[in-house]
Amino acid sequence: MLKQRCHAPLSLLPIALALLLAGCGGNSNSSSPTVPTSVVSTFTTPAAPAGVGYADTAPVQDQAAILPFVDYAYTNQRGDARYATKDTNAGVRVLDGFLALWTPSTLLVDAGVTAPASGSFPAVVASTWTGIPGDATDGTIVNSAVLNANVQYVINATTNRTADQATAAYLDDRRQKGYSVTDGMGPLTSAWRTAAQQTTSITSVPADATTVLYNDSGNNIGVGSASNATFGTAVDLISSVGNNASTEPAKRFYKYARPWRWSNSVVVVPALVPAESSTPSTDGGFPSGHSAEAGRDAFAMAYLVPERYQEMVSRALELGENRILAGMHSPLDVIGGRIQATALVAANLQAATAATRQAAYAQAHTALMSAAGVTTAADFYNYAHSATSATDRFADHATNKANYLRRLTFGFAPIADVTKTAQVPKDAEILLETRLPYLSADQRRVVLKTTALPSGYPVLDDAEGWGRLNLFAAADGYGAFNGDVSISMDASQGGFNALDRWQNDISGKGKLSLSGTGTLHLTGNNSYSGGTEIDAGTLQADSTTAFGSGDVYVAAGTAVCNATSAVQVANYTQLAAGTLQLNLGTNAQGQLKASGTVSLVGGTLNVKFASGFKPAVGSTLTLLGAGKLQGTFSTINVDGFKFTPIYSATGLQIHIDG
């Protein structure tokens, strides 16, 4: 029989000798392993997966042909003849997909607007648009099916809304948007509002709602750095994303009425009837100003507290939907507000210096961690997600994901080519700067490209690509490896640099390589085929297909199998410096199963047990299954038990001795 432990450094020995000794694998709790002659002891170590040999890219489009919003955000003005057209006003241009549905009566920012001539730009004369659908001054319907569906959606939503929905719609209408959206912070809401010194005067629906217009006298996003030393820098950054951010230029260009003017069947929340404007010629519906402002504030807050990134972007889109439930806006209005908000946040974050952004991020974390009573990034993340759905309506990831996706399109079917590759606007990657800090700017651009919506949906196909961005999905990592992806995580930097989770279903022909000291969890139904290589750090499979359909190669670092059933791979190779950890439970939980060959050139196997699972003494547990097993581990550790390893030509088991 072979001895319990060997001390020879296998990486320094020829393969044949190494494998003769490898049967001594085990720790002080193990008995002598059973290694039959059918387990191949001499073999050529497989090479690491080759991948496709290149990285995916998402280059900025020709900036002469497609003017970047971030460079021209300052043109989003009204009352200036220089910026009165789609071609000269970035805030109008980013929404020009609406022109495939509706042609306004004039193609100028001129609803209730005049402006003197400026240089070569002629004076702007106020349009004759009355704001009343169907009259002689109105625009022209281009796509009646979509626009009819747009209004019908509001009719259905407002005639079927619940009392709770009506209350939420009222509060999100009358309260200032910065205050409203902070409840997306969940367990951090109170701490955020206290630190920011946010206030509101809107706490309920007024009893005399049919005659009283109840406006918020609070302070919206809070108090800035001039009077708030501990949180004002964070508030200042949120305030800055409102630069050049008015939706009025676009409203006064597109001249598209609110839904309750299109149909008497739209039921405005009764408490909001006094808020209906009596001047329709300056009260366009597209885009929604409330939706845009909520998006700007919530996206900026998500940047500052990425631990609540998906919850905050979800809250922004929820407020947009509440504008529909209120009867004040249509789905297309809300979509337009979201698009413009996304572009403006990117533009204004980019306009701030890196030092300014970092100072705001650091201040937010210092204040909120102190309020939460935690000192580490990991504890802060856990605290931020410590509430249940009973007190945090954004606690469930799957629910948030489904709602977010629904609110991106509100059920509209594509009306154009659905096969166009997604474009990523210039500087859009800054929106993920704190959420995916271990990726390069180029990699974050690829994440945005691979998680974007398909083309063809109404309004969303702007030339730059703002409309198709899906920030919720992007916060879950890559959607596809269309090239090889190499990441390095530095756990010493804390936060997402130390631990992150990619929850998308990752497709593509590329390869994933991990190095550094951090831990990355893969949780999706992944099908990427280029293989997986671990050179350092920890890569954890939380689903059976987490490692895709290719080979897994553990040169060093740790691969963890933590799925509820066996983790599936093609071929698995582990070198002497590598570690495999299996978190075993019932029904093959935590096992590794290869359809091809498992090649073990030594290395370590750690066997742990899922909560609630305790193997019986005398039982035999399956660890690995393979079409073929060659080699053995140098060391096997089993938490809390003495055991005997049992190798076979197609796998590895352990007998629990005591």
Image: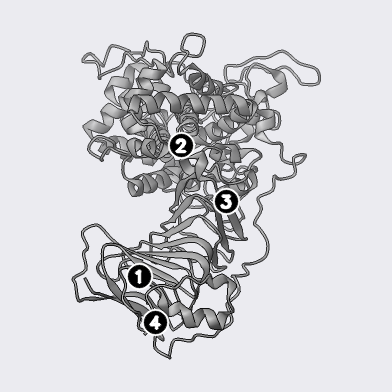
Instruction: Give the mark, 1 or 2, whose residue is nearer the N terminus.
Output: 2
Work out whether residue 302 or residue 169 is closer to the camera in this orientation and state it.
Answer: 302
- The answer to whether marks 3 and 1 mark residues whose Cβ atoms lie closer than 8 Å is no
Determine which quarter of the picture holds residue 110. Answer: top right
Q: Tag on residue 306?
A: 2
Residue 563 horizontal/vertical position (percent): 35, 63
* Real-space Cα separation, disc 1 to disc 2, in angstroms: 33 Å
Separation of residues labelled 2 and 4 (CA atoms): 52 Å
Q: Position of residue 253 (x, y in %)?
A: 60, 27
Quadrant assignment, res 348: top right
The amino acid at mark 1 is Gln
Is residue 423 or residue 494 the one in the foreground?
494
Up the image or down, 346 lies above or below 281; here it is below
- Give the residue displayed 64% in from the left and 16% down from the top: 79
Q: Amino acid at mark 4?
A: Leu
Question: Which residue is labeled 4 in the image?
Answer: 2
Viewer-side label of 2, 3? 3
State the separation of the CA atoms marked 4 and 1. Answer: 26 Å
Observer able to see residue 388: yes
Chain-order first, disc 2 or disc 3: 2
Q: Which residue is mark 3?
A: 488
- Quadrant hosting residue 154: top left
